[in-house]
């Protein structure tokens, strides 16, 4: 029993360009992000995907809708794929997130969740995906918490190692969920 998972981060948002850590705020794609989403579709439309799962936050949904416009591949939104909830700090400057990140591994953001809680939320989605999509190739469009959950659950990478790792964008990550 296994599922081939392709992970892509949502395309560049206006908040990304402004240095804002959006968290659970909706966010919207910038012009650059819209072009990136079109290129994502070009890369993945004929990649053997059976379904696209996306966070239900606007910036991820918009990425999926642009990438797979006029495609027969279904798009399913799931709130478990959201970014970490920064609570009262949703929308904080990115520099502030960088200083908060390590201390929020287990200590929730005020009115929000910890990184570990966010990863556990996504892990629940992955567990269900493993059972419901055996033998399929799927795409997940999400956020940092989504990718960390994949690295942690599939790759066995400790969250303590991920919390300080720098992010380098690339054209997708591939994982195999085994049952």
Image (cartoon, rainbow, N blue to C red):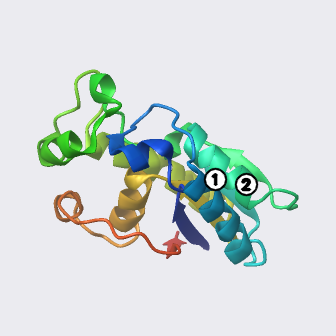
User: Looking at the rendering, in which quadrant would you find the N terminus?
Assistant: bottom right
Percent across and percent down for residue 130 are: 58, 62
- Horizontal arrangement in the rendering, residue 58 relative to residue 142 (left or right): right
Q: Is residue 165 above or below residue 60?
A: below
Q: Secondary structure at mark 2?
A: helix
User: Which residue occupies 53% across, 55% down?
Assistant: 10
Q: What's the mark number on residue 66?
A: 2
Residue 72 vs residue 3, the one in the foreground: 72
Q: Which residue is mark 1?
A: 63
Percent across and percent down for residue 48 are: 75, 77
Query: Disc 2 vs disc 1: Cβ atoms closer than 8 Å?
Result: yes
Percent across and percent down for residue 47 are: 72, 78
- Horizontal arrangement in the rendering, residue 35 relative to residue 80 (left or right): right
Whether residue 25 appears in this view of the structure is yes
Q: Is residue 138 above or below residue 23?
A: below
Asked where in the image residue 90 lies, by quadrant, the reply is top left
User: Which residue occupies 60% across, 64% down?
Assistant: 36
Number of residues whose C-alpha sits closer than 10 Å to that of mark 1, classed few (under 14), some (14–19) or many (20 or more): many
Residue 33 vs residue 118, the one in the foreground: 33
Q: Is residue 142 above or below residue 153?
A: above
Q: Is residue 111 above or below residue 53?
A: above
- Horizontal arrangement in the rendering, residue 5 relative to residue 167 (left or right): right
Number of residues whose C-alpha sits closer than 10 Å to that of mark 2, classed few (under 14), some (14–19) or many (20 or more): some
Q: CA distance from mark 2 to mark 1?
A: 5 Å
Q: Secondary structure at mark 1?
A: helix
User: Which residue occupies 24% across, 66% down?
Assistant: 166
């Amino acid at each position: 029993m296994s599922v081939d998972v392709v992970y892509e981060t949502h395309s560049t948002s206006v908040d990304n360009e402004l240095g804002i850590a959006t968290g659970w705020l909706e966010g919207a794609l910038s012009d650059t992000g819209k072009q990136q989403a079109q290129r994502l579709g070009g890369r993945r439309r004929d990649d053997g995907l059976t379904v696209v799962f996306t966070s239900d936050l606007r910036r991820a949904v918009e990425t999926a809708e642009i990438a797979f416009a006029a495609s027969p591949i279904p798009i399913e939104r799931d709130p478990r794929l959201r970014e970490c909830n920064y609570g009262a700090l949703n929308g904080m400057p990115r520099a502030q997130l960088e200083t908060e990140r390590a201390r929020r591994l287990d200590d929730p953001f005020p009115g929000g969740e910890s990184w570990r809680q966010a990863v556990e939320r996504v892990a629940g989605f992955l567990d269900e995906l493993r059972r419901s999509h055996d033998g399929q190739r799927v795409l997940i469009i999400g956020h940092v918490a989504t990718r960390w959950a994949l690295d942690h659950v599939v790759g066995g990478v400790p969250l303590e190692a991920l919390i300080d790792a720098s992010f380098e964008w690339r054209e997708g990550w591939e994982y195999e969920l085994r049952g």
